[in-house]
Amino acid sequence: MNRRRFLNSTVAGIAVCGLSSSGQGGVQGGGRPAVIASANGLRATEKAREMMRQGADTLDAVIAGVNLVEEDPKDTSVGYGGLPNEEGVVQLDSSVMHGPTRGSGAVAALESIKYPSRVAKLVMERTDHVLLVGEGALKFALAMGFEKQNLLTPEAREIWLKWKRELSPQDDWINPEDRLPESIRDRQKKKVSRMLFNYGTINCNAVNDKGEISGVTTTSGLSFKIPGRVGDSPIIGAGLYVDNHVGACGSTGRGEANLKTCASFMVVEFMRRGLSPEEAGLRVLKRIVENTVEPYLIDHNGRPKFDVKFYALNKRGEFAGTAIWSGSKYAAHDGAKNKHYEVSYLFKREKTG
Ligand code: ASP
């Protein structure tokens, strides 16, 4: 059975849009090297490509790339400025994988440290472990010379307080504008509604001209999560997987779905069997859809109410971003240009209203 027929037979039964033939998405690149990232990583792919051009190791390059987003207070999904858990505490998750040395390192529920990806790399380099969590991860980071700092920016705190006061009509939290006379209330309301809730993560993967592959995923995780909740991002095989013989895949979106399916690992395994990054991503997304049966997670057509996105590349430098739902983008540098591409997807999002 050839590659295309294999894919067709496995996706039969659900609407699959966005394959290369539809004009959306498709497999890009093909001449090494390449760097791919989630949509918030356009600066990361640029930075990583530039460092690789100057001879940097692929893991150092992608970590330097995502550091730009980890330290950016305006990105409320990652590092400093990330949205906190339900108690107002920012807890960060990150993992790294270095293909050439088969190294992996990760931290989960790490507090007060701006660059969890750098700590994850040190777990890989300086310990015989793969994953450190919570207080242990913090102690390790301090021992490695990192400094504690408050990661909750005033903007993230305001978004958390808004979430808190809107949880229940029966508690004693109120909207500040509700105390105001009608005439000023409208003006104030506009200000509040501009505060957008943000879910996200950054994943960045790279292959250089020697075929060396690395990846990193870093996040503040699901906003307002139960303290101690760990998502897919720091779990090797779920939010990130690299095999130096094959390629890399990382993910953003509903972490619980990736945790239950070992999703990034499966994408890389499908690429090992000969599927393109696009075909492999869509194949695993279909598996996630099939395994989503909880009534609160599916719409009236039986489709997930959430999204999951994959960012995959192979050793040849081919890459693709895939998602359950249409409409989102990913960032990639194909060695010549750095830009956003449309994801390939399973379901077209219907316009509402
Ligand atoms: N995958 C992340 C998590 O579940 C969140 C996200 O990417 O939006 O923690």
Image (cartoon, helix red, strand yellow):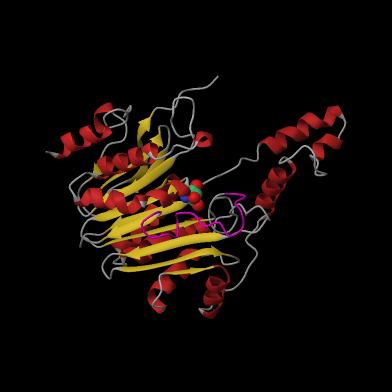
**Residue 15 is drawn in which quadrant?**
top left
Q: Quadrant of the C terminus?
A: top right
Percent across and percent down for residue 220 are 54, 55
Q: Is residue 278 above or below residue 231?
A: above
Residue 163 placement, left or right of 235: right
Q: Nearer the viewer, residue 323 or 291?
A: 291
Q: Main secondary structure of the magenta part?
A: loop
Q: Residue at x 42, y 59 (%)?
A: 235
Residue 5 placement, left or right of 236: left
Q: Quadrant of the N terminus?
A: top left
Q: Which residues are magenta?
A: 223-238
Q: Residue furthest top?
A: 353
Percent across and percent down for residue 212 are 24, 63
Q: Nearer the viewer, residue 312 or 336?
A: 312
Residue 120 placement, left or right of 143: left
Q: Residue at x 51, y 34 (%)?
A: 295
Residue 226 painted magenta = yes
